[in-house]
Amino acid sequence: FGACLDMWDQGQWFSLLTRCGAVTVVTAISLVLLRKWISGGVCRSRARLDGKTVLITGANTGIGKETARDLARRGARVVIACRDLAKAEAAAAEIRRTTGNGNVAVRHLDLASLCSVRQFARDYLASEERLDVLINNAGVMMCPKWTTEDGFEMQLGVNHLGHFLLTNQLLGKLKSSAPSRVVNVSSIAHKGGQIHFDDIFFDKTPYSSLVSYRQSKLAVLLFSRELARRMQGSGVTSYSLHPGVIRTELGRHVLTGYPLLKAIVSGPSLLLMKTPAEGAQTSIYCAVTEGLEKYSGCYFSDCALKQPAPEGKDDQAARQLWELSAKLVGPTDD
């Protein structure tokens, strides 16, 4: 080994080290650029929301919490609507502390219960003067075949039907606060999705958590599109969005039962997934960016207008879904 070392003069060693250094630098730059690309778009609007009220579902963690933090920083009154009041109170306290905005309220809302949704809406309408932005953010992802309090398949029940009823019950407040916005967090998973009108809760066919998740996120997109059509001329606009692949608690069911897979992806995920703050950017963009009114009903990703999959532009399916949803949830204006 020593003889081999002697064969190398200082120039050769310097050349080798230079090449190694160059590779390291190129690798580092590549990783930085990859991370920047993964982080996606950033909302550049500096719009203030003083005197306005924003309601966000599921804002005790993840992108909902980061969305609430940003909008509180802009001066809005922020109402956090969550099932777990203890976690919601902790999140609200942190948001108040980090933004200096003490006008952050917490209310109980369980989207898996139509009774809870109706009670929440009654309380909100009785106590709040305005609703300038409603952000339907809460959701479940690829859980087992659970059912809601009302017997709905959980993913469609929470991701779509709960928000469908909530939005409809608050439409009067949204109209009286116009111009106002409804922001619906969908997903790129709507691609390849289908609304199974003949078996909406998968009672007749084998249950797939992924197929169900895709259906629910397609439903969110179609609901947003049909809402925009119905609200034309009212001053209420509607937007759907894909937030990106994010490091949040939402995917906790995906790797359940696969500890080896969880161990493999936990390291790379730090690089290959957005942070909650990065994932919140498109929700914030749709909530505050000036001049979006002409894009009501459209779909956004990385703070830019994007074309949804063909199934996300099916207006007949959107109308049919609205009618079915209204039958499932019952009266929407009680």
Image (tube, rainbow, N blue to C red):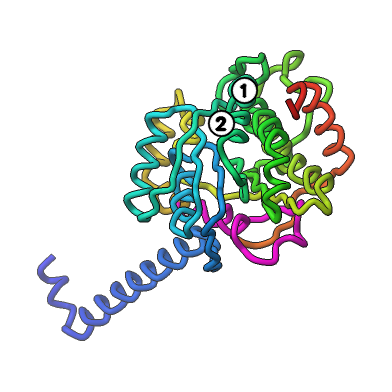
Q: Which residues are magenta?
A: 277-301
Residue 77 point in image, percent of width and height: 50, 49
Compared across the picture, whether 165 is left or right of 60 comes to: right
- In which quadrant of the rendered view does residue 263 lie? top left
Tell me, for residue 154, which label it has, or none.
1
Q: Is residue 163 left or right of residue 332?
A: left
Vertical placement of residue 148 versus 5, above or below: above
Image location of residue 194, percent across then percent down: 77, 34
- Residue ID at (13%, 65%): 1
Nearer the N terminus, badge 2 or badge 1?
2
Q: What residue is shown with label 2?
A: 140
SS under mark 1? helix
Q: Classify residue 134 by image quadrant.
A: top right
Viewer-side residue, 275 vs 5? 275
Residue under the point 76% across and 13% down: 204
Seen at 74% across and 50% down, the residue is 236
Residue 159 falls inside the magenta stretch: no
- Disc 2 marks a residue whose amino acid type is Val
Type of the residue with mark 1: Met
Residue 119, relative to residue 176: is it above or below?
above
Q: Specify few, some or many for label 2: CA neighbours under 10 Å numbering under 14, 14-19, or 20 or more.
A: some
Instruction: Tell me residue 63's x, y (percent).
Output: 49, 46
